[in-house]
Image (cartoon, rainbow, N blue to C red):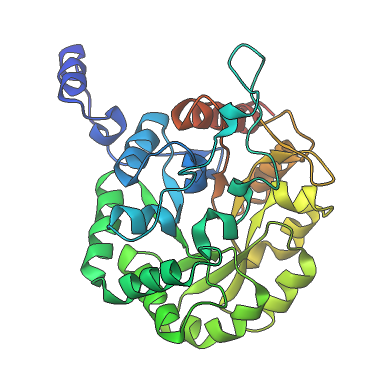
């Protein structure tokens, strides 16, 4: 066991090295439940890859599902960071002093895969520029990014690359290669069901799992995707699933063997607002306790945007998870 004196801790602080890094890899498994983060939690923050890794070290979160925008922006692609040019949650009457601020409301741009820059709207020139960049960049750049996360003590769990019908087969193929270069074999995808038949040969060729992510998607779409290939799984957002009128607890119990990871957020029913953890109507506490009881071995990735910024908001979310899993 490594021990540090008070003087050592002082030197570590002065050197600007996060304590979690000095003590080894970060650990955020609580009572057997793996708690991670979805990088959409950094929407509006302006933080790139380096800031994300530092924040995860500071907060103490060990695993991440990373949006393609964060990687492509870091590598110089024609992609803006999530939230760029749009008002954040602090611009919607959630000023400090008015109580705990609500997060991003369902239906706002941050909730939409298309609005997050996935399809570049109706601008074919921008879409073609991104395609050209993707096809031209070397995979060594992606390996360097994967190493950066590993060296920062953070497990790059999955790559959130949302294929859609604008992707060419060559671009799809390159996306699978990029995923492997990053050091993972899991893609999470806020994608239309229509593109999945085209993804099948690539998923099977590269032995990569593609997990359909839901915003308003429900059990029928999940079933249709999974029936196409054993490589098609589910990345379940329990907050969106609940707000769409479905039961996340029942779905987890029945389909846990084909779930790569879940996103945890707290929303109100009937497509209601996203709320701070514990203040919505999603059975978030029950979901966490189910993971603990059944020992499901996949990460529960926090996805929450609030006005205080990622470090404070993620710390609050993680503390909620700790309180539920430790004391319930």
Q: Is 129 or 99 nearer to us in this picture?
A: 129
The answer to whether residue 296 is visible is yes
Res. 279 image quadrant: top right
Res. 129 image quadrant: bottom left
Judge left or right: residue 36 versus residue 24.
right
Judge left or right: residue 193 versus residue 163.
right
Q: Is 17 or 7 nearer to us in this picture?
A: 17
The answer to whether residue 322 is visible is no
**Total numbered labels:** 0
Against 223, residue 318 (above or below) is: above
Against 206, residue 306 (above or below) is: above
| Residue displayed at 14% across by 19% down | 11
Against 199, residue 138 (above or below) is: above
Point out the image quarter for the C terminus: top right
| Residue displayed at 27% across by 75% down | 136
Q: Is 216 or 320 nearer to us in this picture?
A: 216
Q: Position of residue 73 (x, y in %)?
A: 34, 54
Q: Is 184 or 52 nearer to us in this picture?
A: 52
Point out the image quarter for the N terminus: top left
Against 51, residue 311 (above or below) is: above
Q: Position of residue 219 (x, y in %)?
A: 78, 66
Q: Position of residue 37 (x, y in %)?
A: 50, 44
Judge left or right: residue 21 versus residue 307.
left
Q: Position of residue 124 (x, y in %)?
A: 48, 72
| Residue displayed at 37% across by 39% down | 47
Judge left or right: residue 304 versus residue 75.
right
């Amino acid at each position: 066991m490594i021990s540090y004196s008070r003087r050592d801790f002082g030197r570590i602080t002065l050197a600007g090295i996060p304590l979690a890094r000095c003590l080894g890899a970060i650990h955020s498994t609580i009572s057997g439940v793996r708690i991670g983060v979805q990088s959409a939690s950094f929407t509006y923050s302006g933080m790139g890859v380096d800031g994300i890794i530092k924040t995860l070290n500071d907060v103490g979160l060990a695993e991440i599902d990373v949006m393609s925008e964060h990687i492509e922006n870091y590598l110089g692609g024609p992609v803006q960071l999530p939230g760029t040019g749009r008002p954040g949650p602090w611009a919607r009457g959630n000023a400090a002093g008015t109580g705990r601020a609500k997060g991003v409301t369902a239906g706002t741009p941050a909730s939409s895969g298309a609005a997050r820059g996935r399809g570049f709207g109706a601008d074919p020139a921008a879409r073609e520029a991104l395609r050209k960049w993707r096809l031209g960049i070397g995979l060594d750049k992606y390996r360097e990014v994967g190493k950066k996360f590993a060296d920062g003590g953070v497990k790059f769990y999955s790559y959130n690359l949302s294929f859609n019908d604008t992707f060419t087969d060559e671009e799809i193929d390159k996306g699978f290669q990029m995923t492997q270069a990053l050091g993972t074999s899991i893609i999470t995808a806020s994608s239309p069901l229509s593109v999945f038949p085209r993804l099948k040969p690539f998923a099977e060729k590269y032995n990569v799992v593609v997990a359909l992510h839901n915003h308003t998607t429900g059990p029928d779409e999940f079933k249709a995707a999974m029936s196409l290939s054993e490589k098609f799984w589910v990345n379940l957002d329990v907050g969106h699933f609940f707000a769409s009128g479905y039961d996340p607890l029942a779905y987890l119990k029945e389909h846990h063997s084909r779930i790569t990871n879940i996103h945890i957020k707290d929303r109100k029913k009937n497509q209601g607002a996203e709320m701070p953890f514990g203040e919505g109507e999603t059975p978030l506490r029950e979901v966490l306790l189910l993971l603990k009881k059944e020992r499901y071995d996949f990460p529960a990735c926090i996805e929450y945007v609030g006005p205080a910024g990622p470090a404070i908001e993620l710390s609050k979310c993680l503390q909620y998870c700790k309180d539920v899993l430790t004391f319930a």
